[in-house]
Image (cartoon, rainbow, N blue to C red):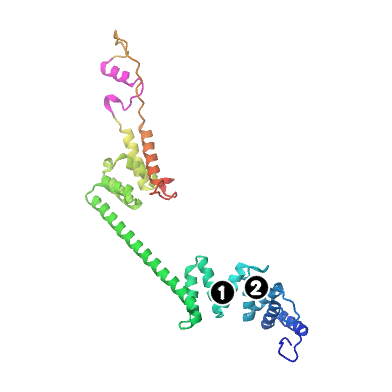
Amino acid sequence: MSDPAHADYDPFLSLRYLQTACAANEAAACGRLALIFFAGEGEVERNLASAGNFAVRACSSQDRDGCEVAEAIFTDGASEQFDAAKALRYRRVNCDFGNRQSCIDLARILYNMDDYLPAEQIALNACKPGDPSSREICQFGTQLRDRRHAIEARQQASRRAAQEAQAKKQAVFESFMAERNYDSALYYALYYSRSKSQAETATLAAARAGAMSGIFKDHLYVLEYWFPSGPVAGIAASEIAKRKRGQDCGIYNCTNMPGASTRRWQAQNGSAGGNYSSGRRSPSFEPVRTPSSAEIAKQTRDRYRSYNCTGSRRLSSSHPVCQ
């Protein structure tokens, strides 16, 4: 009754039977209803909302007519039923059913979404060599495959170059360590190879050898930033504290603050007061204040962080140096 070419064709009566069958989960009946409302057969007006509802029910039971109608409805950008997510879903379903046009459209959509590998696989699966109608999709799939191979070759070459560069840096570091030149090894680890593991190796070796006194002071402050905790942090902090306690500038008393020169002169001459006088008035003099060791250390750390955490050789903001 739903076949216009049949002698018993009755569009309204067939519509009633089809709706009853679809309500009973007959997928083919739901698919036929989707086609009728999508095309507007006979005296039945075209109704995309109804067609979409029947198509979804039919496709959920693997009815191919329903799946194709669902794709057509939800991919129509001019329709109120347009739904990009559903369009992609039903294109996948129809491509899996073997609908080559759905595969072609799906491959191009995935490509535009930067999902290149699935696009390549779908395009090549839809390609039928020797079939003139497949020429375009075969060419598209081949282009994607060639592009992937070129990218993979560049990535492999880049990884190989990085490994070779790292091997060279490791060789230089190990040459300093073999010479027991721990200060140079640490300097190289901090400023050239920028390797935390190398810095740790050099520091621990220097500590075991009792050679921490030969490590440049600024390296210790860098180690404090790189290693906020652990053995290296403890070694660096201990050495910094030791050097602060051991400061001895002799007669100069490590300072040039106002009054220090008078106290030094008194200490040298055994006088508690300033009895020296001159007929000539001395000009007023205020000594230039020199930064303390703590301020110098802070300036050193600030310069190091500025150099390493900004500019073209910028470290990641999560790096311990930039915290």
Give the residue at mark 2. 73
Instruction: Give the Cα separation between the discs numbered 2 and 1.
Output: 15 Å
Quadrant where the image shows the C terminus: top left
Which residue is depicted at the point 39% across and 39% down? 302
Work out whether residue 4 or residue 268 is closer to the camera in this orientation and state it: 4
Q: Reply above or below: 23 against 237.
A: below
Give the residue at mark 1. 92
Q: Considering the numbered disc 2 on the image, is that residue within a helix, a strand or a loop?
A: helix
Q: Which residues are magenta?
A: 249-270
The amino acid pointed to by label 2 is Ile
Residue occupying the far bottom of the picture: 7
Q: Considering the numbered disc 1 on the image, is that residue within a helix, a strand or a loop?
A: helix
Asked whether, in this view, residue 136 is left or right of residue 315, the answer is: right
Asked whether, in this view, residue 68 is left or right of residue 175, the answer is: right
Where residue 245 appears, x then y in whole percent?
Answer: 33, 33
Is there any visible trace of residue 64 in the rendered image?
yes
Is there any visible trace of residue 63 in the rendered image?
no
Counting residues from the N terminus, which is met first, the one under dot 2 or under dot 1? Answer: 2
Work out whether residue 105 or residue 191 is closer to the camera in this orientation and state it: 105
Magenta segment includes 34:
no
Asked whether, in this view, residue 96 is left or right of residue 60, the answer is: left
